[in-house]
Image (cartoon, helix red, strand yellow):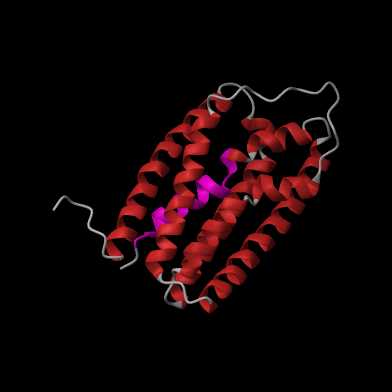
């Protein structure tokens, strides 16, 4: 039995690599250029991001397998990463918004790919989840969900000017906060499960 259900995997990828963290930076990077140029950048970011994250997941899991790390250790590492990221996302709600520059700089394609779309902790999550797969079918599910989140990123970039109108930005911020709380709970559950598998009792006595 896997500790991560497909729904858990999708939720983690959605939080760490999904569009909620991408919409704002992408909008500010491309709002000053015409819609056609913005769409072209979106497809380039999508192509580079999905290639980077899939390659990183497969290469990283291959290297970890050569180090003979046990599944509970990988689970613990993944849980700690998820917890730290969740806390970071929640604390960001209390930070002051970044200063706005008078003149927008031209979009930086590589910056939009990494770390805006392909985050370092997202890569770590992909490596951990791929490494925990014990068969080709499970690996296919993980990579398929990873690709699905990248497609959502593409759709968000293509629709970003519509998404940033009205009350949608407020709704997205609220949704991000809710998902952050859920990730904290899920991360703690993963950490406890990993410790139990290591033989560390979690109950008194």
Residue 59 is left or right of residue 175, and the answer is: right
Given residues 34 and 32, the one toward you in this image is 32
Given residues 140 and 85, the one toward you in this image is 85
Residue 81 in magenta stretch: no
The prevailing secondary structure element of the residues shown in magenta is: helix
Residue 40 seen = no
- Residue 62, position as x, y percentages in the image: 57, 75
Residue 159 seen = yes
- Residue 115, position as x, y percentages in the image: 68, 47
Given residues 144 and 82, the one toward you in this image is 82
Which region is colored magenta?
3-20
Which residue corresponds to the image point at 56% horizontal and 22% vertical from the top-left? 167
Q: Quadrant of the N terminus?
A: bottom left
Above or below, 27 against 145 in this view is above
Which residue corresponds to the image point at 44% horizontal and 46% vertical from the top-left? 83
Residue 154 is left or right of residue 9, and the answer is: right
- Number of labelled discs? 0
Above or below, 27 against 186 in this view is above
- Residue 38, position as x, y percentages in the image: 78, 41
């Amino acid at each position: 039995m896997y500790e991560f259900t497909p729904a858990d995997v999708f939720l983690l990828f959605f939080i760490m690599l999904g569009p909620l963290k991408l919409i704002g930076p992408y909008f500010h990077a491309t709002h000053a250029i015409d819609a056609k140029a913005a769409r072209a950048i979106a497809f380039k970011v999508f192509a580079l991001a999905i290639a980077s994250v899939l390659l990183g997941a497969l290469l990283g899991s291959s290297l970890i397998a050569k180090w003979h790390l046990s599944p509970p250790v990988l689970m613990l590492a993944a849980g700690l990463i998820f917890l730290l990221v969740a806390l970071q996302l929640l604390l960001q709600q209390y930070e002051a918004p970044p200063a706005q520059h008078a003149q927008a700089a031209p979009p930086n394609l590589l910056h939009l790919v990494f770390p805006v779309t392909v985050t370092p902790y997202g890569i770590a999550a992909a490596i951990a989840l791929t490494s925990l797969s014990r068969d080709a079918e499970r690996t296919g599910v993980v990579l398929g969900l990873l690709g699905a989140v990248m497609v959502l990123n593409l759709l968000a970039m293509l629709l970003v000017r519509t998404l940033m109108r009205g009350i949608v930005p407020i709704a997205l911020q609220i949704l991000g906060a809710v998902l952050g709380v859920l990730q904290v709970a899920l991360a703690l559950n993963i950490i406890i499960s990993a410790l139990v598998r290591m033989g560390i009792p979690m109950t008194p006595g």
